[in-house]
Amino acid sequence: MPVVRIYYDDMERLIGASRDTIMGRLAMMGADIGKRAEEEYVDVEFFPDRPDLYSAEGVARAMQGFLGLKTGLVEYEVRQGPIVLQVEESVKSVRPIIGCAVVRGLSFTSEAIESLMGLQEDLHWGLGRNRRKVAIGVHDISRVTPPFRYFGEDPARKFVPLDYAEEMSMHEILEKHPKGKGYGHILKGCERYPLIVDANDQVLSFPPIINGELTSVTEETEDLFIDVTGMDGMVHKALNIVVTSLAERGGQIESVLVKRSEGDLVSPNLRPSSWTVSAAEANSLIGFDLSSQELAECLRRMRFGAVANGSEVEVLVPAYRADIMHSWDIFEDAAKAYGFDRLDARLPGTVTVGRAHPSELRKGEIREVMAGLGYLETMPFTLTNEKVHFQWMRRQGAGAVHVMHPISELHTILRTSLLSSLLEIFAMNQHHPLPQRIFAVGDVVIEKKTRMHLAAASIHSGADFSEIRSALDVVLRELAIAAEIVPSLDGALLPGRGGDLIASGRKIGCFGELHPLVLKSFGLEQPAVGLEIEWGVL
């Protein structure tokens, strides 16, 4: 989860309250207080669903309302600016969405720059999925000349990237620059790369990789140009969060005219969205007994615009709140403002004695067996995606349950097996020594039915069929599973080096050496073997 470093002096100045008052109430707003340097700063951790709190300015704005110092909707003035950015067709197939803004009159301190850079990187992670969906560029506008141009450029184009002294081609940046090596995969297969230049053809940004050194931000910077590029509407949410955070520092927001073939866009758009919520629904969900007036007052303390209208409340949601997708999200904030500490402590009405479910007892037996074989337990995500789960595993995508509204392209289906998740873990841990042997035991969902699986995998230079067959024999014996072994046609396994497990006339698992094409897809350079068994039906 994002960790925001808040300097005490800066926090007191932004919020207008004493350190003791702030620290006494900060945790009740949903923050986890971390490391402290007694006289300097505190590290505060927030859930990823509140990207507007990824900066000291966002925390200060929320705390002012929570403490009752400033309540209600914050209205930010957006002046019409003279700057124009032209979007050319050559970039539409690579990275089509862009939002821009100018913020003037800033007075940067080292704490303010640290907060801005931290906000930028946390948004890259939280909203941007490691820059794939959203990438943010922040520039000293005094060093360039508008209008600006956003287009697809030849990878041979050269400029000086941020923190470097020499020119590099865009292709070289992807191969040699730390940011290029970290995020270059986003542009894999593209014939042209996104670029933002000024009227003199000077480079501002090579999104989503790196800014140009020309527009680097220092403590002397007063006016900023902000570009946010990406693949969907989350671009504009990220832009709103950045510019409103800078406005909390005293900056004046100025619009940019984005000229596009599909129609001109004035960016940013900070108009709030309108909602109508019911006090009765709120009370039924959060367990309080609030009137519509009390509910409205709670929401104003969370920096919403809110007016009671009979039994309902008319709510204005700020443009920087990217997390409000349902009325229940609004009710959650109302509960925080009312105060969980005001709930009455009550003893349970019934007394019960718990015991482990039989399936959990069975899982315990499996864990004991696998630990005895030298395997380390992992807990992979329940959500995955078709590319990793089926395409990379050379399997048919049958029986998967799809997520209706996925928030990420990485999490679009419920897993139907565990083995691909173990290979993902291998891929992320290639910097650790070999051999690596891991297993997972848990639920999968096939054709809308939950089933219980065990998967194990081993990777090292000597991993072969004999190793995984020996482990399988131990598992079958210790768990008293009777199964017939037949040659496997599973695309994930090397032909002739894999087998299927048959029990009661149906396939309950497979094992063997992983196919070289599977290993290549996951970026693995050593042989790997694996097994997977559906044990819940046995």
Image (cartoon, helix red, strand yellow):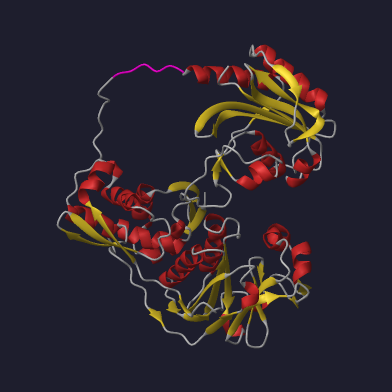
Percent of width and height locating residue 278: 22, 52
Residue 240 highlighted magenta (yes or no): no
Residue at the (73%, 59%) spot, across then down: 181
Percent of width and height locating residue 427: 71, 43
Hey, which quadrant is residue 349 in on the image? top left
Hey, which quadrant is residue 204 in on the image? bottom right
Residue 88 position (above or below residue 9): below
Residue at the (25%, 39%) spot, across then down: 343
Considering every residue shown, the one lying at the far front of the view is: 505
Percent of width and height locating residue 214: 66, 79
Considering every residue shown, the one lying at the far right of the view is: 462
Residue 355 highlighted magenta (yes or no): yes
Tell me which segment is drawn in magenta.
351-356
| Residue 509 appears left or right of 84 | right
Residue at the (53%, 84%) spot, across then down: 84
Residue at the (52%, 63%) spot, across then down: 232
Most common secondary structure along the magenta stretch: loop
Residue 40 seen in the figure:
no
| Residue 107 appears left or right of 195 | left
Percent of width and height locating residue 251: 44, 76
Residue 475 position (above or below residue 457): above
| Residue 329 appears left or right of 458 | left
Residue 498 seen in the figure:
yes
